[in-house]
Amino acid sequence: MIAASIHLAGRSHANQPDDNPAAHILIYTRNGKGFVHKNIDASVACLENICKTNNWTTHATDDAAVFDTDLSRFDVIVFSNTNNQAFTTDDQRSAFQTYIRQGGAFVGIHSACGSERSWPWFWANVGGKFKRHPPFQPFDIKVIDSDNPATETLPAVWKWEDECYYLDNLNPDIHVLLAADMTTVKDSKKDEYPGKVFGNYFPLAWCHQFDGGRQFYTALGHDPKHYKDKNFINHLTGGIKWALDEEAVADNN
């Protein structure tokens, strides 16, 4: 079960560094009816600091009305611990879909995979759909691809404590970056799902290019303290950089 906390209604603010920015990032945190993570403030602060460090401007909000505006001004849209109904209208869903199809970039963090649970296109965009997780616990994470910006600073076996998310409806085009070592995960329902679908491993982070856009997703980040962890900050930074495709952005500026 995804953890509950207080809903953060109507929050919206911007961070504008003095220098000319390389990119503009939307940090989106809306949760529909249901469980809301208590890590949202920490995740936003972390992402804003990452963006400031990299000279990217930010706009952080949980107001779905942002999708009624011109999305083309954003180089990356980050769904940070969104959950359930991330949008309030079909026009907003259509606007987001158009953004991706016109080459937009998406980053999903942790419970973003539990957003829009009735929309198969959104699952494919994220790379999968939340199914369940065992209790919060320490477990080992294997780096599958150490050449990606999201993983290049991580140890080959990353000792971590989190909710080990299991997703289904996995998009077959995802490029897996991190996987949970299932032999280190304690889960009484492990045989029910995921069983041996991926042997002794289960994907936790990936990147792909779907329907015209660039997507990065990580299932990690349940605890607010994660957003002060150096390895996790580097992981998020690299994921945004991959989605941003910095060389392409530089060519357009």
Image: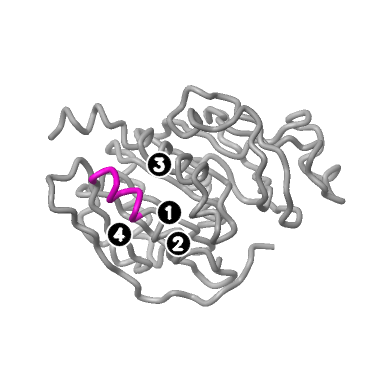
Res 33 → quadrant: bottom right
- Answer with mark 3 or mark 4, whichever residue precedes in sequence: 4
Q: Are marks 4 and 2 in contact (CB under 8 Å)?
A: no
- Answer with mark 3 or mark 1, whichever residue precedes in sequence: 1
Q: Are marks 3 and 1 in contact (CB under 8 Å)?
A: no
Compute the Cα span from label 3 to label 1.
Answer: 14 Å
Quadrant (top left, top right, bottom left, bottom right) of the N terminus:
bottom right
Q: Is residue 21 magenta?
A: no
Compute the Cα span from label 4 to label 2.
Answer: 10 Å
Q: Which residue is mark 4?
A: 67
Q: Which residue is mark 3?
A: 237
Q: Residues within 10 Å of mark 3 (few under 14, many from 20)?
A: many
Q: Are marks 1 and 2 in contact (CB under 8 Å)?
A: yes
Q: Secondary structure at mark 1?
A: strand
Quadrant (top left, top right, bottom left, bottom right) of the C terminus:
top left
Q: Which residue is mark 2?
A: 86
Position of 46 with respect to 203 (left or right) is left
> What span is in magenta?
48-55
